[in-house]
Image (tube, coloured by chain):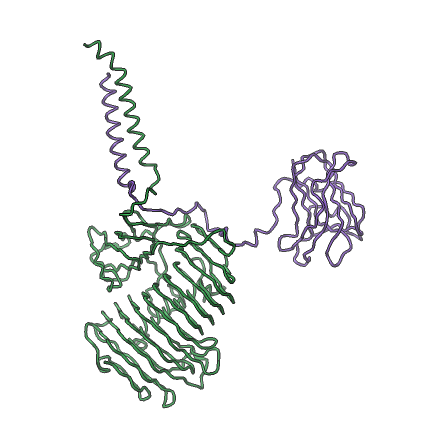
Chain colours: A green, B purple
Amino acid sequence: MKNENKQKSPLSAVLLGIMTVACAAFAIFMFVRPVEAAHNPDLPTVILYDGPSTMATSQSARIWVEGHELFVFDVMVNHEHIWNHNTIPSRTPMAYFCFEGEVTIEVEVPGLAQGISEVHILPAALGITPTLYNNRVSFTISEPGFFTLIYNDHVHLATHIFANPIDTDIPDRDDPNVIFIDPGHWTLDAIVLESNQTLYISGGAVVTSIVLVDNAENVTIRGRGVICGYGFPAWNQPGAYARVPIDIRSSRDITAEGFILINGNAWKFNSYNSRDLFASNIKIISGRQNGDGFTFQSCRNHHVVDSFVRTWDDSLVIKNYAGSSDNITFERIQIWTDLAQSMEIGYETNMGLTINPTISNITFRDIFVLYNNHKPIISIHNGDDALIYNILYQNIIVDNAFMRGDHGHNNELIEFNMIKTHWSTVTDEWGQIRDVVIDGLIVHRTLYGTVPMSNFWGHNEYHTLENVTMRNIYILGERITTLQQLRAHVNPYAFNIVIY
Amino acid sequence: MNKVYVIACCTVMVVSLALGIFAFVTRGGEDSNITIVRTPAQAEAEWPPAVFNPMSLIVELPETPNLAEGRPVHATSFTDVYVPANAVDGTVTSYWESHGFPADFTITLDGVHQVSTVAVSVNPSLLWEARSQAFEVLVSTDNVNFNTVVPHALHDFDPLTGNTVRLDFAPTAAQYVRVHFTANTATRTMGAQAAAIRVFGS
């Protein structure tokens, strides 16, 4: 028997060796195989984007989606809530991805030396309650949106997560009218788009440049990528100039969708003397001088939806520079205003010195103000001689109404007035404001835990503020049904100011 | 069977299976719907390939030596001070100009080379208007029998692209390189012009 066993040993040894090699090969294969495996309809679909190899992911925050770590940008923001010619921006984490289904997001913030004792997700209206365990935040989402994490009830390293819908209908890169920007870090002085062109900025792309559309029509700018102004000095510094990342001028039929604007050195999304613009899913974060978000001058038929705007100057602003403004709607917008106003009409209402200028049919609907840190949230400043009418603010929800103002001024919640300032062009004529409706305003928290003041001022008996209707107003949990409750200052030239 | 061998094999198998299962779980498994969009390796931000780059229009020349520089040349004619040697003096500010058409410009190389590129330039200054010149390129090993390597055609010279026309062809043995000019659309001349005629090969 012993002899027989010894004769079998070589075969067994070979088999054992083969099995050993097979196991080792299995292990190696499992480590090197591609992770993009077969689609499973029962699981969420997630698209993540590497950051450019020229950039390092944030050391302040780490973010995972379904266990996969995202590249995190450190983007410029600004915690100074008063104008400073030489302001120095701060940084805060930002990340983005695309998904469909239900995904779990996890966040750690090593940049918070004291750790995380509490965390909230804004806007509060989303009703998302994250879990916190061992300094790791976790929450689940099933719809695209913008999610801002606030740690320890402080804005330091507030983390912006942009969860996009899957990018579909991607344009044909071989189409001669398509400028297709691939993932990677790209730089050039400007991208000038002509009529019928599409600029597609892929997710994973960071473009250090500006996009100019001048006297063109039927132009599309879209994609999940980033336009970044890092490296451009602030526009008001010696030798520098304003580089507006999206600059639409005297154009029509413009579509903008999906991209992110960060670190710019001036206004962010500008439209001047243009018409028929539709923008959706645009994410804007600014931290430098004149970093206005969506700024439209003398435009018509503009519609902005499902977007995020955190700015160091007015977040949404309408002015008259070269004629009148009409039919402009902002809808389902999240706002974080570190400087100036959240929703501003003015101050320039006739910079172009046109005859009978008007600003009309302006709608702010379903606006979520995460923080407003400086001036009024809702404001109309008729600084020239325009007639401003048919203005609707509907369903405005404010998480933090922290109007710090300017040394005791400009700290109102609502301000409608006619006023001459250094932004005024017409100094000897006055305009009028009439037919303004605020239908639904909820303020969850204020700077001092009290109702902020509001101003309603006309200029004289010929240049009045008329017909302002406010309803469904709730501040600090209390329904506001009188002007006294609103702490409203109404001057003798403001007529028919009604709240119920 | 050797006991040590058996133990070693079993150990490798167990560890391999454990690592394989670990990788399967942590790397998403077969049911993953995760797509990771990768970015290219870049040392610094670059000009995006999809966007027109005016610098890309500047005509680049081979990095090999210019076989024509300083070599003897002969032209069928020249005007005023615009002598043939100006086209092989290593600069693009001086130039040769023929006295009418046709005009042959022949360079004698230092021996037989496998020539593969000829570049004809006029002054790249923006002061020099864009123009077109009609010419062909011929080569010879004996200065008697010339073969056409670039057929006669009208070539555009544009200061925005460096005012250079580069012509590549299959490597051809040559000691004599001739450019045969027949026309120039420039408004201030009646002859051929060349600030540099450069020859590249091995």
Residue A398 shown left or right of residue B52 in the figure:
left
Give B175 or A481, whichever is nearer the viewer.
Answer: A481
Q: Residue at x 42, y 81 (%)?
A: A386
Residue A461: percent from the left, percent from the top? 36, 90
Give B84 or A348, whichever is nearer the viewer.
Answer: A348
Residue B29: percent from the left, percent from the top? 28, 40
Residue A201: percent from the left, percent from the top? 43, 55
Give B121 or A205, whichever is nearer the viewer.
Answer: A205
Q: Is residue A107 visible?
A: no
Question: Vertically, is A350 above or below A1?
Answer: below
Q: How many marks?
A: 0
Residue B129 shown left or right of residue A107 in the figure:
right
Q: Is residue A277 visible?
A: yes
Q: Residue at x 71, y 35 (%)?
A: B174
- If the image is split into quadrants, where does the C terminus of chain B sit? top right
Give A360 or A433, whichever is nearer the viewer.
Answer: A360
Residue B2 shown left or right of residue A432 in the figure:
left
Q: Quadrant of residue A474?
A: bottom left
Q: Residue at x 28, y 57 (%)?
A: A143
Question: Vertically, is A352 above or below A217?
Answer: below
Query: Residue lying farthest front?
Result: A41
Query: Residue lying farthest bottom?
Result: A461
- If the image is split into quadrants, where does the N terminus of chain B sit? top left
Residue A356: percent from the left, percent from the top? 45, 83
Residue B62 shown left or right of residue A402 in the figure:
right
